[in-house]
Image: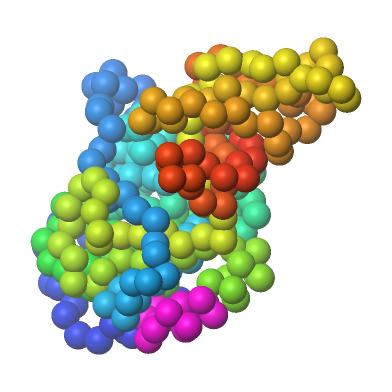
């Protein structure tokens, strides 16, 4: 059940036009200009430290879905590439930017990713997809005020698949850890903490953090290292290059099928790890998936 009004006052009045739905044709992914759009400027999280005080932050579940940016006309992947959603889906969205996650349920990333990445949307599959909105990119006001704006937009649209991400407050580190434990025990991925008084600023800052039992990151495949013993004749490890140029071998988390047909050279892969060495390399890293192109 969506919790309403727990942030108190400060609901911002809207221009009436921002609540009017767009026609489906305005989000036509065949528009050549739409394909040339650059990646949108979005707020990106840093890694949370339990030494920080969580009380100034609003806390939400980190949803394991596909991030989607609505620019007021077109629904886009984080890369800026248009996302082929059904006409009824985009027709109900307002004439204002929204930032959120296309999501089905916990543990359903592969399913939702497969649905939303098709070049031609399958209407019946999209009926299971929710658009969980957590911010209004570029809007004025503190995050707490922007959350109220998200709630108002969702209420005005009155669509079951368009939902505001629930935001909570915790009093201290112990309460935050208890919330994390509860979410993870129920199959969730982790938490996102966003300073309630932070203005919207694109990029990574101390306004937004993610907290997970295991961290994740992406790196590019630069070589296939041969296996030994049971894995002789197939992949032993991937040599990955991190964004800062450092390289490391990733040798765990693969199925036998993946070792026989490993991720292509040049592809981006997601891996999980526990923490970083003093040199900035991941400890106890394990393969998760190939990142699909967007």
- Where residue 186 appears, as percent x and y from the top left, is 65, 70
The residue located at (35%, 76%) in the rendering is: 54
Instruction: Out of 73 and 39, give the one closest to the viewer.
Output: 39
Displayed quadrant of residue 213: bottom right
Left or right: residue 284 compared with residue 56: right
- Which of the 4 image quadrants contains residue 131? bottom left
Q: Residue at x 60, y 28 (%)?
A: 249
Tell me which segment is drawn in magenta. 168-179
Above or below 74: residue 37: above
- Foreground residue among 290 and 229: 229
User: Is residue 69 covered in magenta?
Assistant: no
In this rendering, position of residue 154 left or right of residue 221: left
Q: Nearer the viewer, residue 127 or 265?
A: 265
Can you see residue 55? yes
Q: Residue at x 36, y 60 (%)?
A: 209
The quadrant of the rendering that contains the C terminus is top left
The residue positioned 80% from the left and 26% from the top of the image is 257
Number of callouts = 0
Residue 201 at x, y = what percent?
Answer: 17, 53
Residue 24 as seen in the image, left or right of residue 116: left
């Amino acid at each position: 059940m969506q919790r309403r009004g727990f942030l108190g006052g400060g609901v911002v009045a809207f221009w009436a036009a921002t609540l009017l739905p767009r026609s489906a044709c305005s989000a036509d992914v065949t528009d050549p200009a739409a394909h040339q759009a650059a990646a949108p400027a979005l707020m990106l999280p840093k890694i949370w430290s339990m030494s920080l005080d969580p009380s100034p932050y609003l806390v939400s579940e980190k949803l394991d879905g596909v991030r989607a940016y609505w620019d007021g006309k077109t629904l886009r992947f984080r890369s800026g590439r248009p996302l082929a959603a059904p006409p009824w889906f985009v027709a109900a969205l307002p004439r204002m930017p929204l930032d959120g996650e296309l999501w089905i349920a916990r543990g359903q990333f592969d399913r939702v990713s497969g649905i939303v990445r098709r070049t031609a949307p399958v209407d019946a599959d999209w009926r299971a997809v929710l658009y969980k909105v957590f911010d209004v990119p570029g809007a004025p006001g503190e995050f707490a005020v922007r959350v109220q704006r998200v709630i108002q937009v969702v209420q005005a649209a009155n669509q079951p698949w368009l939902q505001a991400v629930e935001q909570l407050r915790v009093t201290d580190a112990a309460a935050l850890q208890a919330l994390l434990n509860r979410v993870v025990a129920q199959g969730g991925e982790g938490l996102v903490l966003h300073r309630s008084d932070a203005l919207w600023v694109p990029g990574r800052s101390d306004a937004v953090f993610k907290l997970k039992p295991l961290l994740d990151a992406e790196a590019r495949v630069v070589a296939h290292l041969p296996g030994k013993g049971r894995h002789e004749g197939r992949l032993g490890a991937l040599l990955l290059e991190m964004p800062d140029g450092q390289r490391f071998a990733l040798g765990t988390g693969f199925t036998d099928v993946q070792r026989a047909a490993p991720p292509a050279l040049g592809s981006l892969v997601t891996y999980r790890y526990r923490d970083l060495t003093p040199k900035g390399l991941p400890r106890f890293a394990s393969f998760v998936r190939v990142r699909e192109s967007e």
